[in-house]
Amino acid sequence: MTSFILDPGQIETESMRIIRTGLTRPWSEDEYPVVERLIHTSGDPSLEQVIAIHPQAIACGLKALKEGANVITDVEMVRAGISKEKLKSLGGTVESYLNAPGVSEQAKAWGITRSMTAFRMHPERLRGAIVAIGNAPTALLEVLRLAENPETCPALIVGIPVGFVGAKESKDLLWEKVNLPSITVLGTRGGSPLAATVINALIYTAISQIRSS
């Protein structure tokens, strides 16, 4: 009979050991938590090959979190997966405007998606925030447009929309923005759990660094 590890702590430790042992790319020490958590959440070691982390992404994300930055998500599923209490301890909150008053009506008037409309109607909330997109490529396109203005530019964009219509292309556009700190998973793979995972990895790292300083 197969012997299973039953202790939660041991399961996580062994999982991370297996993931770390299997990594093939030269990640920096501060990138490991994000890479390992993405692989852990997806259960897919091959995901490593399409993870893309801007050279300043981790530093910018941690700095923003330590300064109390908010996290803005495209959908409620991403918002639900983020550790709100941990983020609160850093002074930030998680926001999503998908269901905010007037968004649905305005989306119909503009002829665009609600997720895109939600960002377009609340551009002032983006400045200095961390944006986490795990579902809607159209939302990522709108954030990229708003990021061109310093007054509505986020500190970090975690853009990991999933799907076959616009997801790959929107992430390619994000990755081409060499002056914009970002974290993404190139190609069609992605999703809300992965976007939330990246945010949580950054939150835990920020708290750990504060405690050890």
Image (cartoon, grey):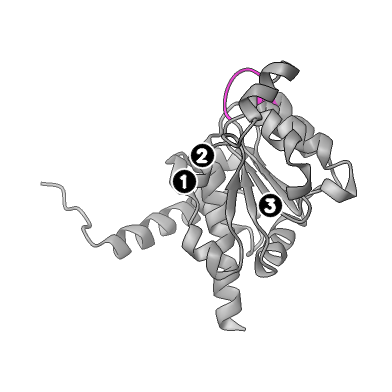
Q: Marks 1 and 3, how far apart in space?
A: 16 Å
Residue at image position (76%, 32%) is: 142
User: Mark 1 highlights which residue?
Assistant: 80
User: Mark 2 highlights which residue?
Assistant: 76
- Numbered label attached to residue 130: 3
Cβ–Cβ below 8 Å for labels 1 and 2?
A: yes
Query: In this orientation, which residue lies closer to the viewer: 100 or 132?
Result: 100
Q: Is residue 117 above or below residue 94?
A: above
Q: Is mark 2 on a helix, strand or loop?
A: helix
In this rendering, the label closer to the viewer, 2 or 3? 2
Disc 2: CA contacts within 10 A as few (<14), some (14-19) or many (>=20): some
The chief SS type of the magenta part is loop
In the image, the segment drawn in magenta is: 162-168
Q: In this view, does 49 lie above or below 8?
A: above
The kind of residue tagged 2 is Glu
Q: Which quadrant holds residue 184?
A: top right
Residue at image position (64%, 17%) is: 165
The answer to whether 156 appears left or right of 164 in the picture is right
Q: Earlier in the sequence, mark 2 or mark 3?
A: 2
The kind of residue tagged 3 is Ile
Residue 30: percent from the left, percent from the top? Answer: 64, 63
Residue at image position (83%, 42%) is: 147
Residue 170: percent from the left, percent from the top? Answer: 72, 28
Q: Which quadrant holds residue 139?
A: top right
Outermost residue on the right side: it is 149
Q: Marks 1 and 2, how far apart in space?
A: 6 Å
